[in-house]
Amino acid sequence: MQNKKKLTFGFMLFALLGMLHQSWAADVYVKSADVYVEDDGTDFVEDFSAEEVAADAIANYSPDGSLFQQITDLEQEKILMQLEKERAQLDLELDRLAAEKIKLHMEIDTLSGRAEQQQQEIETQKAKLEAEAARIEREKESWLAEAEKPVATARATATPIVTETPSVDITQKYRLVNVVGAGNQLQATVEDLTTGQTKRISVGKKLDGLTVKTISVYDGVVFTDADGITQTLNVSNGN
């Protein structure tokens, strides 16, 4: 907009100076007269009309080298210099934008490369973890198989356990009547279920081939036979 104003001002100034110069030239030619010399040596003056003089002045006018031409040239040079300056500034801006664009593309490429590298590292770590998990699973299965071997061997070679039955079922022949005494002096009274007779027993005594192992007020009488089989006679057995 500023350049357009400068151009308009220059053209207006050019037109104004042209009009002034033409008016000045017309005045000069109107007030002047051409002097001619006759063949006989006498001089005479021929006057011209103002219109003819003005027309001739306008037709013969040349602005080259005039003050107006110099001013016009200066204005044009100033406008051209301003345009060149603005053009140079625009070129600098375009170069800066191009450099920024290149820098931005480089940063995008760098970020893209980093993202791909990170993704590759993640995939590598994932593959390592999966391989480690598979290895641990194989070791677990191998360990379990090794652990099962002794158990299977023991099961195959183990002697079957034979459940022995006591020679005398004390609970079917006697019932506990009471427990008396204190500490290690406890004694128990039992009743023969067949005859109704009662017997007093203590720790270490025998009853129908069974030895009294322990006597307790709460647990009753514990008997053991020669094979180590134990039986317990308490209050609940006889009721």
Image (tube, rainbow, N blue to C red):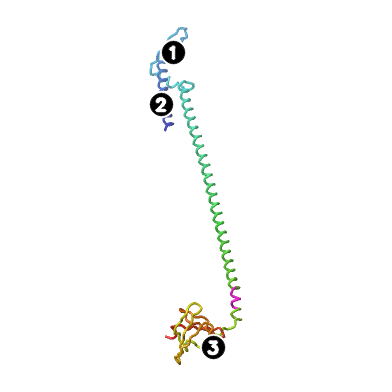
Q: Disc 2, disc 1: CB below 8 Å?
A: no
Gap in Å between the C-alphas at discs 2 and 1?
35 Å
Q: Is mark 2 on a helix, strand or loop?
A: helix
Q: Considering only vertical position in the picture, is 62 above or below 83? A: above
Residue ID for mark 3: 209
Instruction: Give the crowd class for mark 2: few <14, some 14-19, many >=20 residues within 10 Å.
Output: few
**Sequence-first tag of 2 and 1:** 2
Task: Kindly identify the amino acid type of the residue bearing the numbered disc 1.
Answer: Asp
The prevailing secondary structure element of the residues shown in magenta is helix
Query: Residue 96's x, y, as percent?
Result: 51, 39
| Secondary structure found at label 3 | loop
Dot in front, 1 or 3: 3
Nearer the viewer's eye, disc 2 or disc 1? 2
Q: Position of residue 228 (x, y in %)?
A: 56, 83
Amino acid under label 3?
A: Gly
Quarter of the N terminus within the rendering: top left
Secondary structure under the numbered disc 1 in the rendered image: strand
Read off the residue under disc 2.
12
Residue 29 location, x and y as percent? 42, 15
**Numbered circles on residues, count:** 3
Q: Where is residue 27 in the image (x, y as percent from the top left)?
A: 40, 16
**Mark toward the start of the polypeptide (1 vs 3):** 1
Q: Give the range drawn in magenta.
A: 147-152
Q: Can residue 16 be seen in this view?
A: yes
Cα–Cα gap, marks 2 and 3: 151 Å
